Image (spheres, helix red, strand yellow):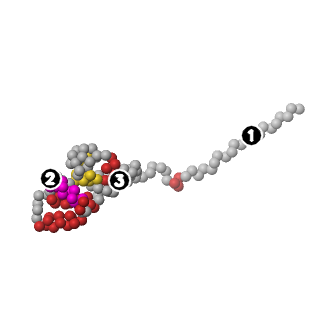
Amino acid sequence: MDELIRNLLALQNLEFGGQETDDTAAQVAELRGKIPPPVLGHYDRLRVRGKKGLAVVNNQVCSGCHMRLPLAVIMTLRHGQDLQLCDNCGRYLYLPDETPGVPTGEEPKPKPVRSPRRKKKSLAPPDDLKLTASPPAPLQIQIQPRLSPE
Ligand SMILES: [Zn+2]
């Protein structure tokens, strides 16, 4: 996941977590320092209205407004190239971590499972029982004495 989105998400989890301690305040301040002001500004505009600034994408659907997102948005998110806003609700979109990567068309092939059992002893005759017989002798060609007609 993109670091910016990760920071935003961490910030959102802290601010919407409902547990404000000195510790979280420090973390919030640190995260806010890492996030560019325009992004933070947009996030805050949503936050003051009680809305979360980020929405996870599930099955190509924005979890904030349940609108289907264009595939181009999903692809950009997958590549982690840029922040993407939902056209409909204006939230920053992110993909859940467990989303598999872009299909490459090259699925890992499962390795053939070898039987844990030991191989049975071969029932074939051992090698030293090779056939020693000489090849069959050529047939004796019986030459018929030519009976020359007299
Ligand atoms: Zn949305």
Foreground: disc 1 or disc 2: 2
Residue located at (33% from left, 47% from top):
71
Q: CA distance from mark 1 to mark 3?
A: 62 Å
- Predominant SS along the magenta part: helix
> x%, y% of residue 12?
18, 58
Residue labelled with disc 2: 49
Callout 1 secondary element: loop
> x%, y% of residue 20?
11, 62
Q: CA distance from mark 2 to mark 3?
A: 62 Å
- The number of callouts visible is 3
Q: Which residues are magenta?
A: 39-49
Task: Specify the amino acid type for callout 1.
Answer: Gln
Residue 75 covered by magenta stretch: no
Q: Are marks 2 and 3 in contact (CB under 8 Å)?
A: no
Query: Looking at the figure, which quarter contains the C terminus?
Result: top right
Q: CA distance from mark 1 to mark 2?
A: 115 Å
Residue 142 is marked as 1
- In this image, 112 relative to 24: left or right? right
Work out whether residue 52 or residue 100 is closer to the camera in this orientation and state it. Answer: 52
Q: Quadrant of residue 22?
A: bottom left
Q: Earlier in the sequence, mark 2 or mark 3?
A: 2
Most distant residue in the right direction: 150
Residue labelled with disc 3: 116
